[in-house]
Image: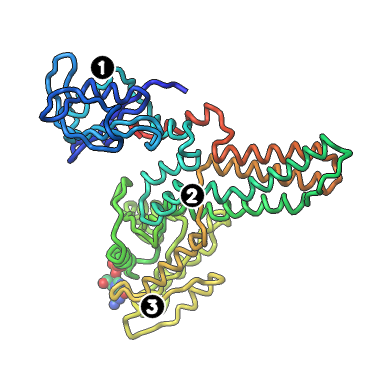
Protein backbone atom coordinates (compact mmCIF):
# COMPACT_ATOMS: atom_id res chain seq x y z
CA UNK A 1 0.00 0.00 0.00
CA UNK A 2 1.11 3.48 -0.84
CA UNK A 3 1.86 5.12 2.50
CA UNK A 4 1.90 8.75 1.37
CA UNK A 5 -0.17 11.16 3.40
CA UNK A 6 -3.15 12.12 1.27
CA UNK A 7 -5.37 15.21 1.20
CA UNK A 8 -8.55 16.22 -0.58
CA UNK A 9 -11.57 18.47 -0.33
CA UNK A 10 -14.18 16.17 1.26
CA UNK A 11 -17.29 18.29 0.72
CA UNK A 12 -19.13 18.77 -2.58
CA UNK A 13 -18.15 21.54 -4.99
CA UNK A 14 -20.10 24.74 -4.68
CA UNK A 15 -20.96 27.09 -1.86
CA UNK A 16 -22.02 25.97 1.62
CA UNK A 17 -21.83 26.80 5.29
CA UNK A 18 -18.60 24.95 5.77
CA UNK A 19 -16.30 22.88 3.60
CA UNK A 20 -13.83 20.28 4.80
CA UNK A 21 -10.29 19.50 3.72
CA UNK A 22 -9.26 16.08 4.95
CA UNK A 23 -5.68 14.90 5.47
CA UNK A 24 -4.83 11.28 6.30
CA UNK A 25 -1.56 9.43 6.82
CA UNK A 26 1.53 9.19 8.98
CA UNK A 27 2.51 12.79 8.24
CA UNK A 28 -0.95 14.30 8.82
CA UNK A 29 0.05 15.97 12.09
CA UNK A 30 3.26 17.48 10.71
CA UNK A 31 1.63 18.71 7.49
CA UNK A 32 -1.20 20.30 9.44
CA UNK A 33 1.26 21.92 11.85
CA UNK A 34 3.02 23.55 8.89
CA UNK A 35 -0.13 25.25 7.61
CA UNK A 36 -2.12 25.97 10.80
CA UNK A 37 -1.65 28.69 13.43
CA UNK A 38 -3.66 28.53 16.58
CA UNK A 39 -5.70 31.61 17.27
CA UNK A 40 -4.24 34.06 19.79
CA UNK A 41 -0.91 32.23 19.94
CA UNK A 42 0.06 32.84 16.36
CA UNK A 43 2.39 29.91 16.31
CA UNK A 44 2.47 26.35 15.09
CA UNK A 45 0.84 23.67 17.23
CA UNK A 46 2.42 20.38 18.09
CA UNK A 47 -0.47 18.06 17.31
CA UNK A 48 1.50 15.00 18.36
CA UNK A 49 1.39 16.35 21.90
CA UNK A 50 -2.20 17.48 21.66
CA UNK A 51 -4.99 15.33 22.98
CA UNK A 52 -6.68 13.38 20.17
CA UNK A 53 -10.21 14.03 18.95
CA UNK A 54 -10.16 17.71 19.83
CA UNK A 55 -11.12 20.81 17.88
CA UNK A 56 -8.67 23.71 17.63
CA UNK A 57 -9.64 27.16 16.42
CA UNK A 58 -7.18 29.07 14.25
CA UNK A 59 -5.99 30.09 10.82
CA UNK A 60 -4.67 28.27 7.77
CA UNK A 61 -1.59 30.05 6.49
CA UNK A 62 0.55 29.71 3.40
CA UNK A 63 3.90 28.55 4.82
CA UNK A 64 5.75 30.19 1.92
CA UNK A 65 4.45 33.70 2.60
CA UNK A 66 2.85 33.35 6.04
CA UNK A 67 -0.26 34.95 4.48
CA UNK A 68 -3.54 33.95 6.12
CA UNK A 69 -5.81 31.86 3.93
CA UNK A 70 -8.91 31.13 6.03
CA UNK A 71 -10.20 31.01 9.57
CA UNK A 72 -10.88 27.34 10.37
CA UNK A 73 -11.59 24.69 12.95
CA UNK A 74 -9.02 21.92 12.96
CA UNK A 75 -10.08 18.45 14.11
CA UNK A 76 -7.10 16.36 15.21
CA UNK A 77 -7.77 12.62 15.30
CA UNK A 78 -4.92 10.25 16.01
CA UNK A 79 -5.18 6.77 14.49
CA UNK A 80 -6.42 4.11 14.85
CA UNK A 81 -9.74 5.59 15.96
CA UNK A 82 -10.38 7.32 12.64
CA UNK A 83 -12.18 6.61 9.35
CA UNK A 84 -8.96 5.40 7.69
CA UNK A 85 -7.35 4.13 10.93
CA UNK A 86 -4.53 6.54 10.10
CA UNK A 87 -3.76 9.86 11.76
CA UNK A 88 -6.31 12.27 10.36
CA UNK A 89 -6.77 16.02 10.33
CA UNK A 90 -9.94 17.67 9.11
CA UNK A 91 -9.95 21.40 8.46
CA UNK A 92 -13.42 22.93 8.48
CA UNK A 93 -13.08 25.99 6.30
CA UNK A 94 -15.59 28.53 5.05
CA UNK A 95 -17.63 26.68 2.46
CA UNK A 96 -16.57 28.35 -0.77
CA UNK A 97 -14.50 26.95 -3.63
CA UNK A 98 -11.55 29.34 -3.19
CA UNK A 99 -10.92 28.93 0.57
CA UNK A 100 -11.09 25.17 0.07
CA UNK A 101 -8.86 25.07 -2.98
CA UNK A 102 -6.31 27.37 -1.32
CA UNK A 103 -6.31 25.29 1.86
CA UNK A 104 -5.81 22.13 -0.20
CA UNK A 105 -3.06 23.81 -2.21
CA UNK A 106 -1.01 24.64 0.89
CA UNK A 107 -1.61 21.15 2.35
CA UNK A 108 -0.18 19.67 -0.87
CA UNK A 109 2.70 22.14 -0.81
CA UNK A 110 3.40 21.09 2.78
CA UNK A 111 3.88 17.47 1.73
CA UNK A 112 0.55 15.76 1.13
CA UNK A 113 -0.39 13.99 -2.09
CA UNK A 114 -3.77 14.64 -3.69
CA UNK A 115 -6.07 11.70 -2.85
CA UNK A 116 -7.54 9.53 -5.59
CA UNK A 117 -11.33 8.96 -5.72
CA UNK A 118 -12.35 6.76 -2.78
CA UNK A 119 -8.81 6.58 -1.43
CA UNK A 120 -9.79 7.35 2.18
CA UNK A 121 -12.29 4.49 2.10
CA UNK A 122 -9.77 2.26 0.29
CA UNK A 123 -7.37 2.85 3.16
CA UNK A 124 -10.12 2.06 5.67
CA UNK A 125 -10.53 -1.25 3.80
CA UNK A 126 -6.81 -2.01 3.46
CA UNK A 127 -6.28 -1.17 7.13
CA UNK A 128 -9.01 -3.60 8.11
CA UNK A 129 -11.52 -1.11 9.48
CA UNK A 130 -14.13 -2.00 6.85
CA UNK A 131 -14.57 -5.13 4.82
CA UNK A 132 -15.54 -4.81 1.18
CA UNK A 133 -19.29 -5.11 1.80
CA UNK A 134 -19.01 -2.22 4.24
CA UNK A 135 -16.91 -0.14 1.87
CA UNK A 136 -19.48 -0.66 -0.88
CA UNK A 137 -22.24 0.16 1.60
CA UNK A 138 -20.68 3.62 1.96
CA UNK A 139 -21.75 4.32 -1.63
CA UNK A 140 -25.28 3.18 -0.87
CA UNK A 141 -25.43 5.38 2.24
CA UNK A 142 -24.35 8.42 0.25
CA UNK A 143 -26.69 7.62 -2.64
CA UNK A 144 -29.73 6.65 -0.52
CA UNK A 145 -32.95 8.14 -1.89
CA UNK A 146 -35.37 7.13 0.83
CA UNK A 147 -35.12 6.57 4.57
CA UNK A 148 -35.67 2.84 3.99
CA UNK A 149 -32.80 2.50 1.53
CA UNK A 150 -30.63 4.48 3.95
CA UNK A 151 -31.59 2.09 6.76
CA UNK A 152 -30.58 -0.92 4.66
CA UNK A 153 -27.29 0.68 3.63
CA UNK A 154 -26.40 1.68 7.18
CA UNK A 155 -27.02 -1.83 8.44
CA UNK A 156 -24.64 -3.14 5.75
CA UNK A 157 -22.16 -0.48 6.82
CA UNK A 158 -22.38 -2.05 10.27
CA UNK A 159 -21.56 -5.45 8.74
CA UNK A 160 -25.03 -6.90 8.18
CA UNK A 161 -24.33 -8.41 4.75
CA UNK A 162 -21.15 -10.05 6.01
CA UNK A 163 -23.07 -11.46 8.98
CA UNK A 164 -25.64 -12.92 6.62
CA UNK A 165 -22.89 -14.64 4.63
CA UNK A 166 -21.23 -15.94 7.80
CA UNK A 167 -23.18 -19.23 8.04
CA UNK A 168 -22.02 -20.10 4.50
CA UNK A 169 -18.45 -19.20 5.36
CA UNK A 170 -18.46 -21.22 8.59
CA UNK A 171 -20.06 -24.28 7.00
CA UNK A 172 -17.60 -24.32 4.09
CA UNK A 173 -14.58 -23.79 6.36
CA UNK A 174 -15.49 -26.71 8.59
CA UNK A 175 -16.23 -28.97 5.61
CA UNK A 176 -12.88 -28.09 4.10
CA UNK A 177 -11.08 -28.73 7.38
CA UNK A 178 -12.66 -32.17 7.51
CA UNK A 179 -11.91 -32.97 3.85
CA UNK A 180 -8.31 -31.82 4.14
CA UNK A 181 -7.75 -33.73 7.37
CA UNK A 182 -9.17 -36.95 5.97
CA UNK A 183 -6.98 -36.57 2.88
CA UNK A 184 -3.83 -35.87 4.92
CA UNK A 185 -4.41 -38.52 7.59
CA UNK A 186 -6.45 -41.22 5.83
CA UNK A 187 -5.65 -43.82 8.49
CA UNK A 188 -6.60 -41.71 11.49
CA UNK A 189 -9.95 -41.75 13.13
CA UNK A 190 -11.47 -38.43 12.11
CA UNK A 191 -14.88 -37.49 13.26
CA UNK A 192 -16.99 -37.65 10.12
CA UNK A 193 -18.68 -34.50 8.96
CA UNK A 194 -22.11 -34.61 7.41
CA UNK A 195 -21.17 -33.27 3.99
CA UNK A 196 -24.70 -32.82 2.56
CA UNK A 197 -25.84 -30.97 5.70
CA UNK A 198 -22.84 -28.63 5.60
CA UNK A 199 -23.34 -27.88 1.92
CA UNK A 200 -27.02 -27.27 2.48
CA UNK A 201 -26.35 -24.79 5.29
CA UNK A 202 -24.03 -22.85 2.99
CA UNK A 203 -26.52 -22.97 0.15
CA UNK A 204 -29.40 -21.75 2.30
CA UNK A 205 -27.48 -18.74 3.59
CA UNK A 206 -26.52 -17.72 0.07
CA UNK A 207 -30.01 -18.33 -1.32
CA UNK A 208 -31.47 -16.13 1.43
CA UNK A 209 -29.23 -13.25 0.40
CA UNK A 210 -30.22 -13.69 -3.24
CA UNK A 211 -33.90 -13.88 -2.28
CA UNK A 212 -33.63 -10.46 -0.65
CA UNK A 213 -31.56 -8.93 -3.42
CA UNK A 214 -34.37 -8.16 -5.85
CA UNK A 215 -36.14 -6.18 -3.14
CA UNK A 216 -32.85 -4.58 -2.15
CA UNK A 217 -32.31 -3.30 -5.67
CA UNK A 218 -35.80 -1.91 -5.62
CA UNK A 219 -35.13 0.13 -2.46
CA UNK A 220 -31.78 1.34 -3.74
CA UNK A 221 -32.41 1.94 -7.45
CA UNK A 222 -36.17 2.48 -7.45
CA UNK A 223 -38.73 1.38 -10.02
CA UNK A 224 -40.98 2.87 -12.66
CA UNK A 225 -44.72 2.51 -12.47
CA UNK A 226 -46.90 3.37 -15.46
CA UNK A 227 -50.40 4.75 -14.93
CA UNK A 228 -52.54 3.77 -17.89
CA UNK A 229 -56.18 4.17 -18.75
CA UNK A 230 -58.40 5.94 -21.20
CA UNK A 231 -58.84 9.72 -20.91
CA UNK A 232 -60.82 11.02 -17.94
CA UNK A 233 -60.61 7.96 -15.69
CA UNK A 234 -58.48 10.01 -13.25
CA UNK A 235 -54.81 9.19 -13.98
CA UNK A 236 -53.57 12.72 -13.41
CA UNK A 237 -55.72 13.06 -10.32
CA UNK A 238 -54.26 9.80 -8.98
CA UNK A 239 -50.72 10.95 -9.70
CA UNK A 240 -51.37 14.14 -7.80
CA UNK A 241 -53.03 12.33 -4.91
CA UNK A 242 -50.02 10.01 -4.57
CA UNK A 243 -47.65 12.97 -4.73
CA UNK A 244 -49.59 14.66 -1.93
CA UNK A 245 -49.70 11.51 0.19
CA UNK A 246 -45.96 10.84 -0.07
CA UNK A 247 -43.66 13.73 -0.30
CA UNK A 248 -42.33 13.84 -3.84
CA UNK A 249 -38.68 12.93 -4.24
CA UNK A 250 -36.58 15.30 -6.27
CA UNK A 251 -34.91 13.37 -9.06
CA UNK A 252 -32.33 14.17 -11.66
CA UNK A 253 -34.63 12.44 -14.16
CA UNK A 254 -36.14 14.85 -16.67
CA UNK A 255 -39.61 15.94 -15.62
CA UNK A 256 -42.47 16.60 -17.97
CA UNK A 257 -42.63 15.74 -21.60
CA UNK A 258 -45.53 16.61 -23.82
CA UNK A 259 -47.31 13.39 -23.10
CA UNK A 260 -45.61 11.42 -20.35
CA UNK A 261 -45.42 13.09 -16.97
CA UNK A 262 -42.88 11.64 -14.53
CA UNK A 263 -42.83 12.20 -10.80
CA UNK A 264 -40.97 10.26 -8.15
CA UNK A 265 -42.61 9.37 -4.85
CA UNK A 266 -41.47 7.53 -1.77
CA UNK A 267 -43.56 4.37 -2.10
CA UNK A 268 -43.16 2.81 1.36
CA UNK A 269 -39.42 3.32 1.02
CA UNK A 270 -39.13 2.54 -2.69
CA UNK A 271 -38.20 5.51 -4.87
CA UNK A 272 -40.98 4.99 -7.40
CA UNK A 273 -41.17 7.02 -10.57
CA UNK A 274 -44.77 7.34 -11.74
CA UNK A 275 -45.35 7.73 -15.45
CA UNK A 276 -48.69 9.26 -16.34
CA UNK A 277 -49.22 8.17 -19.92
CA UNK A 278 -51.41 9.78 -22.51
CA UNK A 279 -53.53 6.68 -22.75
CA UNK A 280 -53.13 3.90 -25.22
CA UNK A 281 -55.74 4.77 -27.82
CA UNK A 282 -55.48 4.49 -31.55
CA UNK A 283 -55.46 7.86 -33.14
CA UNK A 284 -55.41 9.55 -36.52
CA UNK A 285 -53.77 12.63 -35.12
CA UNK A 286 -50.01 12.61 -35.71
CA UNK A 287 -49.12 14.45 -32.50
CA UNK A 288 -51.34 12.21 -30.48
CA UNK A 289 -49.88 9.17 -32.15
CA UNK A 290 -46.40 10.15 -30.99
CA UNK A 291 -47.90 10.43 -27.53
CA UNK A 292 -49.27 6.95 -27.85
CA UNK A 293 -45.86 5.64 -28.90
CA UNK A 294 -44.31 7.24 -25.84
CA UNK A 295 -46.97 5.64 -23.68
CA UNK A 296 -46.09 2.25 -25.08
CA UNK A 297 -42.42 2.89 -24.34
CA UNK A 298 -43.30 3.99 -20.84
CA UNK A 299 -45.13 0.72 -20.44
CA UNK A 300 -42.16 -1.29 -21.62
CA UNK A 301 -39.76 0.32 -19.14
CA UNK A 302 -42.14 0.07 -16.20
CA UNK A 303 -41.76 -2.55 -13.46
CA UNK A 304 -45.49 -2.42 -12.69
CA UNK A 305 -48.59 -0.98 -14.30
CA UNK A 306 -51.63 0.64 -12.70
CA UNK A 307 -54.66 0.28 -14.92
CA UNK A 308 -57.03 3.05 -13.86
CA UNK A 309 -60.78 2.55 -14.42
CA UNK A 310 -63.72 4.84 -13.72
CA UNK A 311 -65.74 2.78 -11.26
CA UNK A 312 -68.78 5.02 -11.50
CA UNK A 313 -69.64 3.93 -15.03
CA UNK A 314 -69.61 0.64 -16.91
CA UNK A 315 -66.41 -0.10 -18.85
CA UNK A 316 -66.18 1.67 -22.19
CA UNK A 317 -64.67 0.28 -25.36
CA UNK A 318 -61.49 2.32 -24.61
CA UNK A 319 -61.08 0.57 -21.25
CA UNK A 320 -61.51 -2.83 -22.84
CA UNK A 321 -59.04 -2.05 -25.61
CA UNK A 322 -56.35 -0.95 -23.18
CA UNK A 323 -56.98 -3.86 -20.84
CA UNK A 324 -56.85 -6.33 -23.73
CA UNK A 325 -53.59 -4.80 -24.96
CA UNK A 326 -52.14 -5.18 -21.45
CA UNK A 327 -53.40 -8.71 -20.93
CA UNK A 328 -52.12 -9.85 -24.30
CA UNK A 329 -48.60 -8.51 -24.09
CA UNK A 330 -45.82 -10.95 -24.98
CA UNK A 331 -44.86 -12.96 -21.91
CA UNK A 332 -41.50 -11.21 -21.46
CA UNK A 333 -43.19 -7.80 -21.40
CA UNK A 334 -45.85 -8.82 -18.94
CA UNK A 335 -45.09 -6.63 -15.94
CA UNK A 336 -47.59 -7.01 -13.10
CA UNK A 337 -50.83 -5.04 -13.36
CA UNK A 338 -52.74 -3.55 -10.43
CA UNK A 339 -56.26 -2.40 -11.31
CA UNK A 340 -57.31 0.80 -9.55
CA UNK A 341 -61.07 1.27 -9.69
CA UNK A 342 -61.27 5.01 -9.24
CA UNK A 343 -64.05 7.46 -8.34
CA UNK A 344 -65.32 5.11 -5.62
CA UNK A 345 -66.55 8.19 -3.74
CA UNK A 346 -69.34 8.54 -6.30
CA UNK A 347 -72.66 6.76 -5.83
CA UNK A 348 -72.74 4.65 -8.97
CA UNK A 349 -70.69 1.47 -8.54
CA UNK A 350 -70.72 -0.11 -11.98
CA UNK A 351 -69.54 -3.69 -12.52
CA UNK A 352 -65.96 -3.66 -13.86
CA UNK A 353 -66.04 -7.42 -14.49
CA UNK A 354 -65.73 -7.13 -18.29
CA UNK A 355 -62.28 -5.63 -17.71
CA UNK A 356 -61.07 -7.30 -14.52
CA UNK A 357 -61.85 -10.81 -15.80
CA UNK A 358 -59.28 -10.29 -18.56
CA UNK A 359 -56.64 -10.65 -15.84
CA UNK A 360 -56.27 -13.71 -13.72
CA UNK A 361 -55.97 -13.29 -10.90
CA UNK A 362 -56.89 -9.62 -10.99
CA UNK A 363 -55.24 -7.49 -8.34
CA UNK A 364 -58.00 -4.95 -7.79
CA UNK A 365 -58.19 -2.00 -5.41
CA UNK A 366 -61.06 0.47 -5.02
CA UNK A 367 -59.81 4.02 -4.70
CA UNK A 368 -60.81 7.62 -4.94
CA UNK A 369 -58.21 10.06 -6.20
CA UNK A 370 -60.45 12.86 -4.91
CA UNK A 371 -60.79 11.70 -1.29
CA UNK A 372 -57.59 9.58 -1.18
CA UNK A 373 -59.66 6.61 -0.10
CA UNK A 374 -57.89 3.29 -0.81
CA UNK A 375 -54.50 4.84 -1.58
CA UNK A 376 -52.65 2.95 1.20
CA UNK A 377 -54.14 -0.30 -0.13
CA UNK A 378 -53.10 0.62 -3.68
CA UNK A 379 -49.56 1.36 -2.46
CA UNK A 380 -49.40 -1.93 -0.60
CA UNK A 381 -50.57 -3.80 -3.72
CA UNK A 382 -47.87 -2.02 -5.74
CA UNK A 383 -45.10 -2.84 -3.28
CA UNK A 384 -46.15 -6.49 -3.45
CA UNK A 385 -46.42 -6.44 -7.25
CA UNK A 386 -42.90 -5.00 -7.45
CA UNK A 387 -41.56 -7.71 -5.13
CA UNK A 388 -40.64 -5.33 -2.33
CA UNK A 389 -42.63 -6.98 0.42
CA UNK A 390 -39.92 -9.31 1.68
CA UNK A 391 -38.67 -9.70 5.23
CA UNK A 392 -35.00 -9.06 4.59
CA UNK A 393 -34.12 -7.01 1.55
CA UNK A 394 -30.42 -7.26 0.69
CA UNK A 395 -28.57 -4.45 -1.02
CA UNK A 396 -26.08 -6.27 -3.17
CA UNK A 397 -24.06 -5.00 -6.07
CA UNK A 398 -23.71 -6.78 -9.41
CA UNK A 399 -20.20 -7.78 -8.42
CA UNK A 400 -21.37 -9.26 -5.13
CA UNK A 401 -24.25 -11.06 -6.82
CA UNK A 402 -21.90 -12.62 -9.39
CA UNK A 403 -19.62 -13.89 -6.60
CA UNK A 404 -22.57 -15.36 -4.66
CA UNK A 405 -23.81 -17.05 -7.84
CA UNK A 406 -20.33 -18.51 -8.41
CA UNK A 407 -20.20 -19.78 -4.85
CA UNK A 408 -23.53 -21.55 -5.38
CA UNK A 409 -22.30 -23.22 -8.57
CA UNK A 410 -19.30 -24.64 -6.67
CA UNK A 411 -21.54 -25.80 -3.82
CA UNK A 412 -23.84 -27.55 -6.28
CA UNK A 413 -20.80 -29.16 -7.93
CA UNK A 414 -19.64 -30.40 -4.54
CA UNK A 415 -23.08 -31.79 -3.74
CA UNK A 416 -23.28 -33.61 -7.08
CA UNK A 417 -19.72 -34.94 -6.67
CA UNK A 418 -20.56 -36.24 -3.21
CA UNK A 419 -23.77 -37.89 -4.44
CA UNK A 420 -21.85 -39.55 -7.27
CA UNK A 421 -19.25 -40.89 -4.84
CA UNK A 422 -16.43 -38.90 -6.42
CA UNK A 423 -13.14 -38.87 -4.43
CA UNK A 424 -13.02 -36.40 -1.58
CA UNK A 425 -10.05 -34.45 -2.91
CA UNK A 426 -12.15 -33.41 -5.89
CA UNK A 427 -14.92 -32.48 -3.54
CA UNK A 428 -12.45 -30.36 -1.59
CA UNK A 429 -11.57 -28.44 -4.75
CA UNK A 430 -15.19 -27.37 -5.22
CA UNK A 431 -15.64 -26.48 -1.55
CA UNK A 432 -12.44 -24.42 -1.63
CA UNK A 433 -13.62 -22.60 -4.77
CA UNK A 434 -16.98 -21.89 -3.12
CA UNK A 435 -15.26 -20.50 -0.05
CA UNK A 436 -13.06 -18.34 -2.25
CA UNK A 437 -16.11 -16.92 -4.04
CA UNK A 438 -17.74 -16.02 -0.69
CA UNK A 439 -14.46 -14.35 0.23
CA UNK A 440 -14.67 -12.22 -2.89
CA UNK A 441 -17.89 -10.67 -1.58
CA UNK A 442 -16.37 -9.65 1.72
CA UNK A 443 -13.04 -8.74 0.16
CA UNK A 444 -11.02 -11.46 1.86
CA UNK A 445 -10.04 -12.57 -1.62
CA UNK A 446 -9.99 -9.75 -4.10
CA UNK A 447 -7.54 -8.56 -6.68
CA UNK A 448 -6.33 -5.07 -7.31
CA UNK A 449 -8.27 -4.55 -10.55
CA UNK A 450 -11.53 -5.22 -8.70
CA UNK A 451 -10.56 -2.82 -5.91
CA UNK A 452 -9.69 -0.13 -8.45
CA UNK A 453 -13.01 -0.61 -10.17
CA UNK A 454 -14.96 -0.35 -6.91
CA UNK A 455 -13.17 2.66 -5.48
CA UNK A 456 -13.16 4.60 -8.73
CA UNK A 457 -16.93 4.90 -8.25
CA UNK A 458 -16.38 6.99 -5.12
CA UNK A 459 -15.89 10.72 -5.23
CA UNK A 460 -12.63 12.39 -4.36
CA UNK A 461 -12.42 13.03 -0.65
CA UNK A 462 -14.46 9.97 0.38
P1 LIG B 1 -57.09 11.54 -16.77
O1 LIG B 1 -57.51 12.02 -18.11
O2 LIG B 1 -57.18 10.04 -16.70
O3 LIG B 1 -55.77 12.03 -16.32
O4 LIG B 1 -58.20 12.04 -15.73
P2 LIG B 1 -58.18 13.31 -14.76
O5 LIG B 1 -57.29 13.05 -13.60
O6 LIG B 1 -57.93 14.52 -15.54
O7 LIG B 1 -59.67 13.28 -14.22
C1 LIG B 1 -60.79 13.39 -15.08
C2 LIG B 1 -61.95 13.93 -14.28
O8 LIG B 1 -62.35 13.01 -13.27
C3 LIG B 1 -61.65 15.22 -13.55
O9 LIG B 1 -62.76 16.08 -13.65
C4 LIG B 1 -61.40 14.79 -12.12
O10 LIG B 1 -61.72 15.79 -11.20
C5 LIG B 1 -62.35 13.63 -11.99
N1 LIG B 1 -61.89 12.65 -11.02
C6 LIG B 1 -60.67 12.03 -10.98
N2 LIG B 1 -60.61 11.17 -9.94
C7 LIG B 1 -61.79 11.25 -9.28
C8 LIG B 1 -62.34 10.60 -8.13
O11 LIG B 1 -61.72 9.77 -7.46
N3 LIG B 1 -63.60 10.94 -7.77
C9 LIG B 1 -64.32 11.86 -8.46
N4 LIG B 1 -65.53 12.12 -8.02
N5 LIG B 1 -63.85 12.47 -9.54
C10 LIG B 1 -62.61 12.19 -9.97
Q: Is residue 297 visible?
A: no
Query: Where, by quadrant of the figure, is residue 72 drawn?
Result: top left
Name the one closer to the observer, 353 or 75. Answer: 75
Q: Position of residue 90 (x, y in %)?
A: 27, 33
Which residue in the protein does label 3 denote?
311
Residue located at (70% from left, 38% from top): 432
Compared with residue 200, is residue 12 higher up or lower down, i.e. above or below?
above
Q: Point out the quarter of the image occupied by ligand 1.
A: bottom left
Spot occupied by residue 296 in the image (x, y as percentages of width and height): 43, 54
Q: Is mark 1 within 8 Å of ligand 1?
A: no
The residue positioned 81% from the left and 49% from the top of the image is 192
Work out how far the residue at label 3 is from the one at label 2, CA to CA, in angstroms: 39 Å
Going by the picture, which residue comes out furthest to the bottom? 347
Question: What residue sits right under mark 1 in the picture?
Answer: 109
455 lies left or right of 203: left
Viewport quadrant of the C terminus? top left
Q: Which of 421/175 is in front?
A: 175
Figure check: 255 above or below 23: below
**What residue occupies the far right of the structure in this picture?**
187
Dividing the picture into quadrants, the one containing residue 260 is bottom left
Q: Earlier in the sequence, mark 1 or mark 2?
A: 1
Whole-angstrom CA distance, mark 1 to mark 3, is 72 Å
* Vertical side of 112 occupied by 248: above or below: below
Left of 361 or right of it: where is 34?
A: left
Specify few, some or many for label 3: CA neighbours under 10 Å numbering under 14, 14-19, or 20 or more.
many
Q: Quadrant of residue 107?
A: top left
Residue pointed to by mark 2: 395
Task: Name the secondary structure under disc 3.
Answer: loop
Amino acid sequence: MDTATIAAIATPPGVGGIGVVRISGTEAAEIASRIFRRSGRDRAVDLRNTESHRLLYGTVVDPASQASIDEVLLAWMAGPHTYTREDTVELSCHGGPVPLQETLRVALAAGARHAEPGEFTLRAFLNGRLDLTQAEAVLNVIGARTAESLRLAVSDLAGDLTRRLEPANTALISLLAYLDASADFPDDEIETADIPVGLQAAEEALEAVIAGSKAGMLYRDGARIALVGRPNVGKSSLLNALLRADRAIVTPVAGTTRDVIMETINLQGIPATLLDTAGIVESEDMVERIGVERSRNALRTAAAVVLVLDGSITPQSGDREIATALAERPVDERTPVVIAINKSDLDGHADQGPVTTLFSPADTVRISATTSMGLPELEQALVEALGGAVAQPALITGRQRAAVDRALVHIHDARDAHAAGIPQDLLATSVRAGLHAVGEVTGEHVDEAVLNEIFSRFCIGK
